[in-house]
Amino acid sequence: MLLPVSTWPDIEAWLKKSRTIVIPIGSMEQHGPNGFIGTDAICPEVIAHQAERLAPDEMLVGPTFAVGCAQHHLGFPGTITLRPSTMIAAMADWTESLMRHGFERIYWLNGHGGNVATIDAAFAEIHAHRSFDPRGADNRPGLSLKRRNWWDFVSVMNLCNQLYPTGHGSHATASEVSVTYHAYPDRARPEVQMSPKIAPTGTISDAVSYRRDFPDGRIGSDPTQSNADDGARIVAVAAEAVLEEVRRFAA
Amino acid sequence: MLLPVSTWPDIEAWLKKSRTIVIPIGSMEQHGPNGFIGTDAICPEVIAHQAERLAPDEMLVGPTFAVGCAQHHLGFPGTITLRPSTMIAAMADWTESLMRHGFERIYWLNGHGGNVATIDAAFAEIHAHRSFDPRGADNRPGLSLKRRNWWDFVSVMNLCNQLYPTGHGSHATASEVSVTYHAYPDRARPEVQMSPKIAPTGTISDAVSYRRDFPDGRIGSDPTQSNADDGARIVAVAAEAVLEEVRRFAA
Amino acid sequence: MLLPVSTWPDIEAWLKKSRTIVIPIGSMEQHGPNGFIGTDAICPEVIAHQAERLAPDEMLVGPTFAVGCAQHHLGFPGTITLRPSTMIAAMADWTESLMRHGFERIYWLNGHGGNVATIDAAFAEIHAHRSFDPRGADNRPGLSLKRRNWWDFVSVMNLCNQLYPTGHGSHATASEVSVTYHAYPDRARPEVQMSPKIAPTGTISDAVSYRRDFPDGRIGSDPTQSNADDGARIVAVAAEAVLEEVRRFAA
Amino acid sequence: MLLPVSTWPDIEAWLKKSRTIVIPIGSMEQHGPNGFIGTDAICPEVIAHQAERLAPDEMLVGPTFAVGCAQHHLGFPGTITLRPSTMIAAMADWTESLMRHGFERIYWLNGHGGNVATIDAAFAEIHAHRSFDPRGADNRPGLSLKRRNWWDFVSVMNLCNQLYPTGHGSHATASEVSVTYHAYPDRARPEVQMSPKIAPTGTISDAVSYRRDFPDGRIGSDPTQSNADDGARIVAVAAEAVLEEVRRFAA
Amino acid sequence: MLLPVSTWPDIEAWLKKSRTIVIPIGSMEQHGPNGFIGTDAICPEVIAHQAERLAPDEMLVGPTFAVGCAQHHLGFPGTITLRPSTMIAAMADWTESLMRHGFERIYWLNGHGGNVATIDAAFAEIHAHRSFDPRGADNRPGLSLKRRNWWDFVSVMNLCNQLYPTGHGSHATASEVSVTYHAYPDRARPEVQMSPKIAPTGTISDAVSYRRDFPDGRIGSDPTQSNADDGARIVAVAAEAVLEEVRRFAA
Amino acid sequence: MLLPVSTWPDIEAWLKKSRTIVIPIGSMEQHGPNGFIGTDAICPEVIAHQAERLAPDEMLVGPTFAVGCAQHHLGFPGTITLRPSTMIAAMADWTESLMRHGFERIYWLNGHGGNVATIDAAFAEIHAHRSFDPRGADNRPGLSLKRRNWWDFVSVMNLCNQLYPTGHGSHATASEVSVTYHAYPDRARPEVQMSPKIAPTGTISDAVSYRRDFPDGRIGSDPTQSNADDGARIVAVAAEAVLEEVRRFAA
């Protein structure tokens, strides 16, 4: 079930059998010369929606949290970021809203490495709010919060390595661009050339040093290899992994 | 141009000719027995995207701000709300990010009456932040922030009144449900019955009184009249109105 | 009863018969060449105090919330504004304090159009805080928050239209200046001339554009018509309307 | 000049000769069986306004900051408090607004001992905001913030000791009640009896212990001695002291 | 017992007999030509630890809150300050954490005059948070928060006056420098000369005026008199006073 | 140089040759039956101070940020945590203070895995604050923020693996307890027995589940192996690694 295109009686019925919901969470940031700015939001959304299609009775997918922490990409036009403190507040509000309805297990399917720190900090903030409540956390129904980066599943990593033995990279990766081309084939940019073919690697700091060190936005990748067919394969593998993990998480 | 499926060089090119961007802004809240929880996010998104199709060189549409202020709907499962203070912070971060790239005119196409107060408060917060800067607002490039509720265009109102002379209503309206059925025809719920046929009207306060006064979530509407064809007509009229207004706003 | 000049045993006694309080809420901002900076705080205060005189046993009036949201007037010396986020926090603190004593119905008599958005956002923030409480809003005594702009009563509008068939305007209006001249007759400025006699109209944005578009601060008004006698009549009509509405609100 | 009943051209003219403004700052809290809840806001307001009458060309008095920090009085109905963090934010907003117009010296005439900590913390917050600005505080016009408790002037203390050799007290004092009776003679409560005649003394902590230790709200005082004539004398002496100090502060 | 070098079973055992903890709280700020930047954190820490040595079964000392409010010293390199709002939040978090374990009495041994306002504001913030809880503060175990400046004990003042009849001063005092030399004898700076021998006195405002008025950082002091032996005597007297007061506070 | 026991002229001199400072950052949380609550603050402090002794002219060590993010340990008495949002604010204040003096490179030597997310989020918050400044980050001196977990150096990991081939663990590790025993040999607890000898492993969530899953606080470790001699060796290796990295970072 997809929450945004469901009705409230649908969710009421869902809550009679499950306390679990999946939230795709991404970012709105540059992804190199041929990658979409929305890549990190599109990937977890597409994968979660595909997992839902595999087992609509076992997966409830909420709206996509589409703008995350991307300060380091602000040197490239189009990037939009939340401050981490804003993102923590927003994630807390989503969680509080869901808890009010009875949800107790929230699985955040993450599409952006730069979100990891703030997502984990948000979890600690939410739990601390409960711990500081004078009645004590022990007396209330539990709350489980889990983050999963979609690219961290072993099956996904194996496929990506197989598809892109060189130039997979760590930002604007060949795999994530493929996933978005699968999702929006009409928007693919096969004509874009890049130089060097494989982007440099290095460490990330703030927006100014990022643009200086990675002038076209890519890190270590050659996304000219990306294509919709690869994307379809990656989505299929990732969706199965997500479904399997959500089943365990919900149990 | 749609920002989430564009590249950063695309946006860099856009900024050479325009300082304007359109942001659909909605809510994630119950919309009665046959309306989608995402209705208020879907409507402005669909309309903005249609306007972009009419004139891709004149419209840049950003990501949809999909979760807004919906405290009063929290009595119905599936509703997700931001606190107004969180929404103000998030809108400020989006605006600051866009300003850094050179955007100076942001047009928020709103899909939710309950967002109006907080959007306008956010505008005042953003402007106050600039006013309080010791260098003074006068010395910097201007910033124009505009909110438009998509249903407020005269042409849209006329069409809705013509399509639904009775039972258009003020929440879970016949027109907004039609727009979402046009966007997601496979998700339409023609089988859902409602009683009374036209929902009661009244004033909105908090979540508890809302659920008491409007037990199935609708206010004054009969959305069993809704259908995808009507939705297509409404979207067409609204998209033209948006395009025309954005042209004037950008000038 | 007026809370600031009452004792705590007075309020203790009041709470045995009523859970309602009226809070005048205004702004501290320019009101054109002959209007007081405190106009928007003075008007609701004077009207509420007059209503209290009509029925001291039925009206408890709290302190005036005198500084509101006036960023757009910062281009004129003397204007003081809160950021909307600060105003939300302050209104929440007032409300929490009053709730602790047992108040459950707070009627905010508003004197400033620019406050409307933030007052309504504050209501949503306060209700959201209650909704997010894990015990749930349903288990606690209700809280009713109501905003009323004093100029929106039909009887008041009719009188203003009759007194000022032209040049009533929308900022620094003839009627509000009259109310303040009634309250502070020694401070009236009958000698001030204005040109043009009726100020231009237009839309409001931030402080910089406001001063550019409305160079003496007025919008659409000719407050040289204002006088204390008119003010007395307006106050009388508005006070009756407030009293009647508060009686219904408290019931 | 009193800002709330002045026009913006008045303030524009003032700023050509002075950068100084006086802000009365008080509290809304219980003041024993015969003291007004607004006592701490009324006292500095009355004194500042009297000082202004003595030398209207040398004193600009802004609106009264009427609700302060009074958590410890919340055990008594009618008390309204800001959280200190809210009060800091509001004082910062007032200061930023005034600085935008060119004010550089703000004299806060305080009426409440419980405000002292938060006022001083607000000063540090405001200064820190300037220090953290990357351009450095040194490059900008100075900002002087001063707090004065009206009862701390030697001339005022001497008069109070002379008027009330016993039972002056430290909360709901004989002197402050007299000042308010002078301001609102019709509201005086000569009929109220108290037992014990002189209230107990002790240390203040939170609301719960305060009500337990000081059951009628007074600390160490016998305000049955209070009367309007005494109040007039106190106001006269305090107003002269304020005027003299403001002259030095503005120099 | 010293919490940072104790185990959790130690604290669990402590809580079976006591609900009290002592927190040294200081600042990280310039202390003149021969004083350490950490002086205000070192002094209360050394004194509290000495008190603990006198009666380890009666004193539990927590970690030192080492960075406080020192905006006014930012003109001197090495000074680190929290904004007051941050310090309030941090003190609230420490308090909430301790309350969760069952602590009900927190004694803050303060080493910095510039912390006084913010510590007291933090107490009000913490108590207000409890007062605003809808269940009401009365229904929960009490919370006592106490601040003590170590130099305010009569026995300490007497000793300091005896040791330094002239040039004790009010910042970078002879006594506090002696205490730190006692704590870190190898770091003492007997070779540093100062001119004038006794620093000027005056009032403190922000960082810019402080550096202008007190060019080497001292106020009214001659800390060339400071030495480790004096420090040992001061610590001994202060530790006894703290121990005695904590015994009463815990009772 | 150690900032807390240096004078401001010392720091002024330092800044003439370097823009770099090292900040040990830890936590105050349970560390099993024989580990100190302050372990995570003590370890980076001891290591940084040892590195400073190796090359006092090349290392400036600031005060230890001793209380971090430890919500998940709140089930054990003595643990103190900041909410992540508070920790972000505090780290920002430290950074802003240091930047005002001219520091441009801050090296945070971290002692707590649970701090990683919030430290990295704080970096993004600080950088975003600069990015959002209307003058643009490019026009100002750079700011480099680096986090290093002391246990992540290869040389340290190798030594730990050699010392504790089994039972090193991931919380209350054998190595960190040894470091603290080296620092505070008199506080060591060789007598404490544990059962099971090697604690269970698993995933961490909130405080309630942590205490349920790891009943004595340890994860995967056998710290009965810990001793001061091992600690001395670990500190020596870690200090060299820190010194070498700080030299590169400062270059």
Image (tube, coloured by chain):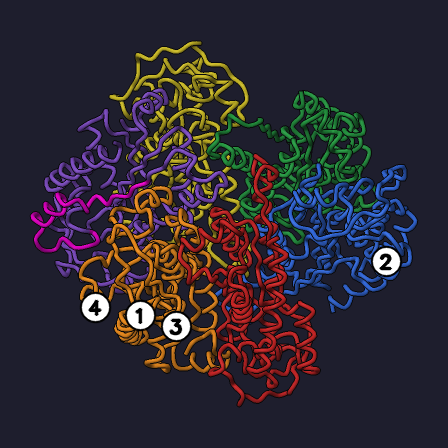
Chain colours: A green, B blue, C red, D orange, E purple, F yellow
Are the residues flagged by discs 4 and 2 from a single subunit?
no
In the rendered image, residue C155, in percent from the top left (x then y), is placed at 68, 71
Q: Nearer the viewer, mark 4 or mark 2?
A: 4
- The kind of residue on which mark 2 rests is Leu
Marks 1,2: beta carbons within 8 A: no
Residue at which label 3 appears? D21
Marks 1 and 2 sit apart, C-alpha to C-alpha, by 76 Å
- The kind of residue on which mark 1 rests is Ala
Chain of the residue under label 1: D
Label 1 sits on a secondary structure element that is helix
Q: Nearer the viewer, mark 2 or mark 3?
A: 3
Q: Name, please, the residue furthest toward the front.
A: D191
Q: Residue D206: tell me if it is visible.
A: yes
Are the residues flagged by discs 2 and 3 from a single subunit?
no
Marks 3 and 1 sit apart, C-alpha to C-alpha, by 28 Å
Q: Where does the magenta region start and end?
A: E145-172
Count neighbours of disc 4 (C-alpha within 10 A) and say few if under 14, some if 14 to 19, many if 20 or more: some
Count neighbours of disc 2 (C-alpha within 10 A) and say few if under 14, some if 14 to 19, many if 20 or more: some
Asked whether, in this view, residue E185 is left or right of residue A162, the answer is left
Label 4 sits on a secondary structure element that is helix
Q: Quadrant of the N terminus of chain F?
A: top left
Marks 1 and 4 sit apart, C-alpha to C-alpha, by 15 Å
Q: Residue at x 30, y 31 (%)?
A: E20
Residue A120 placement: quadrant:
top right
Q: Which mark is residue B54?
A: 2
Label 2 sits on a secondary structure element that is helix
> Toward the viewer: D151 or C59?
C59
> Toward the viewer: F145 or F200?
F200
Residue at which label 4 appears? D159
> Was residue D52 drawn as part of the magenta stretch in this picture?
no
Residue at which label 1 appears? D228
